[in-house]
């Protein structure tokens, strides 16, 4: 059995196993799992209402970044360097958008998959990048803003380093596996 088959088996069984473990653990500890779930969902809805203004602000900023042409300028500056490592320039907008916006990066990933195909290296790289990185600025703006955290210290730097490592890992893994 190759690495691809192992990954496929793990991906098929991971979520059902996690759900079963949560339910069994709740049963063993005599926790009313459904009631706790509903209470958490209620709190989640209240938080969602609080973060709407921050969400609107970050989405407007992202739209301005893309429409102003700043993304294209950034890609044209960096693509010669990434090209030395074999990183496709077509995937760079996705790499830049991912820390900013989940929906924006989904749009770019969909565009890459439609253009190059789901089984192409670029399509697989975009999909792997989507799962290997986080929407750093979105999280900082929305969640920190909603609970009024003003001093973020090293949060953004640490998150961007983690995103960079995730992008590098996605490229290396895709180069090895695909």
Image: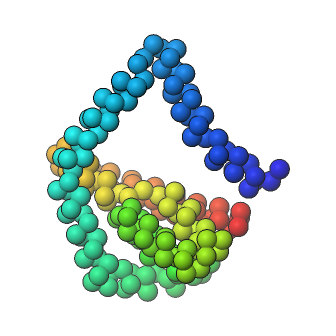
Q: Who's the residue at 56% across and 34% down the image?
A: 18
Q: Out of 153 and 105, give the one closest to the viewer.
A: 105
Q: Who's the residue at 74% across and 48% down the image?
A: 6
Q: From where the camera sits, is residue 168 visible? A: no
Tell whether 94 sits left or right of 154. Answer: right
Tell whether 148 sits left or right of 120. Answer: left
Q: Out of 74 and 123, give the one closest to the viewer.
A: 123
Tell whether 12 sits left or right of 71. Answer: right
Direction right: furthest residue: 1
Q: Quadrant of the C terminus?
A: bottom right
Query: Residue 79's x, y, as percent?
Result: 50, 82
Q: From where the camera sits, is residue 178 visible? A: yes
Q: Who's the residue at 65% across and 61% down the image?
A: 173
Query: Residue 126's x, y, as percent?
Result: 54, 68
- Looking at the image, is 165 positioned above or below residue 110? above
Query: Residue 35's x, y, as percent?
Result: 36, 24
Q: Out of 77 and 117, give the one closest to the viewer.
A: 117
- Looking at the image, is 106 positioned above or below residue 29? below
- Looking at the image, is 82 positioned above or below residue 44? below
Q: Who's the residue at 55% across and 64% down the image?
A: 127
Q: What is the quadrant of residue 93 in the picture? A: bottom left
Query: Residue 167's x, y, as percent?
Result: 52, 63
């Amino acid at each position: 059995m190759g690495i691809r088959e192992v990954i496929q088996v793990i991906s098929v069984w991971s979520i059902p196993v996690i759900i079963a473990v949560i339910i069994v653990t709740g049963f063993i500890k005599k926790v009313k799992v459904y009631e706790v779930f509903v209470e958490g969902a209620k709190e989640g809805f209240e938080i969602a209402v609080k973060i709407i203004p921050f969400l609107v602000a970050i989405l407007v900023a992202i739209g301005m970044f893309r429409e102003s042409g700043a993304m294209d300028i950034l890609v044209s500056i960096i693509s010669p360097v990434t090209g030395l490592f074999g990183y496709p320039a077509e995937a760079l907008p996705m790499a830049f958008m991912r820390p900013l916006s989940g929906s924006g990066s989904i749009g770019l990933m969909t565009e890459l998959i439609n253009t190059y195909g789901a089984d192409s290296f670029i399509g697989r790289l975009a999909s792997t990048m989507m799962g290997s990185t986080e929407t750093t600025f979105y999280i900082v703006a929305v969640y920190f803003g909603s609970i009024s955290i003003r001093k973020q210290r090293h949060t953004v730097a640490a998150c961007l380093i983690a995103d960079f490592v995730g992008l590098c890992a996605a490229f290396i893994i895709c180069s090895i596996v695909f």
